[in-house]
Image: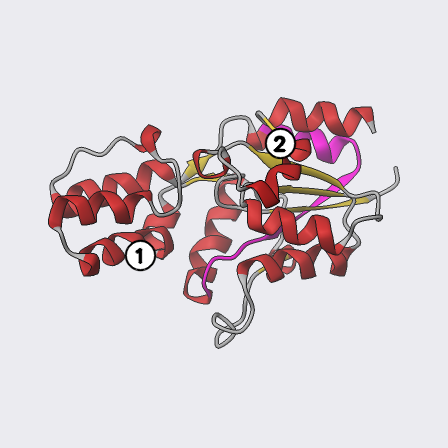
Amino acid sequence: MQIKEWVTDVDGVWADLKEPVVAAVNQEWGTNLDPRDINSWMWVREQIYEQTGSAEEGERATQFWFDPDVLFLAKPVEGAVEAALGLMEKGYRPWAATSRLPNARESTIEWLRIYFPFVPTERVYMRDPGLELIVSSSEIKLAAVGMVGAELYTEDDQLAVDNVARGWPDSGLVIAMMSRGWNMHLPPELEYLEQYRTNGWNEVLARVGAK
């Protein structure tokens, strides 16, 4: 079977962070926020700012998205493990490319070992310490796609999808942008990304099968 390289984001694609992040925020501030209401990456910050009137507290709440201990509590996105196994049966070799900060590397590797043990450490692509302010999260994904010669890219961050789509326009790359609250309302300049929108892992499998 011919091996086809597959680059995937982790958060929002394989790892469902909404529950642990919102639970941590609710515990810290005594709020009753519902993760189903998240409609942007700034939603937690906005909610805590509204509750406290403090921009500093809002920013502190945002940091739960990057806390290694909170990230480790995430469960897999529904259908992600099964879809990964199905794609591997079709010859796709997964690479995890994540914009998580270097301090989360150990917890990320361990989380993948538990839920996606078929992704070895050498196929986990993250920024090295000191590059957090030099290399953007979108650039990490663009570099990973080019580095491995990916034929499939799964992502939920519209800015990363835009970067990859523009960076590799004629490569035959299949792009699947997972529908999430934070990418439902695209600005006019990104509306073209609707062609990549995917409502669940079954649609990813169908798109790959139709190629």
Q: Is 206 or 190 nearer to us in this picture? A: 190
Sequence-first tag of 1 and 2: 1
Q: Is 16 or 110 nearer to us in this picture? A: 16
**Position of 210 compared to 194: left or right?**
right
Q: Is 16 or 107 nearer to us in this picture? A: 16
Which of the 4 quarters of the picture holds residue 91?
Answer: top right
Which of the 4 quarters of the picture holds residue 195?
Answer: top right
Residue extending farthest to the right is: 2
Q: Where is residue 145 in the image (x, y as percent from the top left)?
A: 72, 54
Residue in the picture at 47% in, 54% down: 108
Q: What residue sits right under mark 2 in the picture?
A: 197
Element at label 2 = strand
Q: Where is residue 184 in the image (x, y as percent from the top left)?
A: 49, 33
Residues drawn in magenta:
82-101
**Position of 209 compared to 131: left or right?**
right
Residue in the picture at 34% in, 28% down: 36
Give, as a three-letter code, the residue at label 2: Arg
- The colour scheme of the drawn protein is secondary structure
Could you give the CA–CA distance between mark 1 and mark 2, rounded to whole angstroms? 28 Å
Of discs 1 and 2, which sits in the foreground? 2
Asked if the residues shown at circle 1 and circle 2 are in contact, with their CB atoms under 8 angstroms apart, the answer is no
- Is 93 a magenta residue? yes
Q: Position of residue 49 (x, y in %)?
A: 19, 49
Q: Is 12 or 162 nearer to us in this picture? A: 162
Q: What residue sits right under mark 1 in the picture?
A: 63
- Is 80 a magenta residue? no
Which of the 4 quarters of the picture holds residue 67?
Answer: bottom left
**Quadrant assignment for the C terminus:** top right
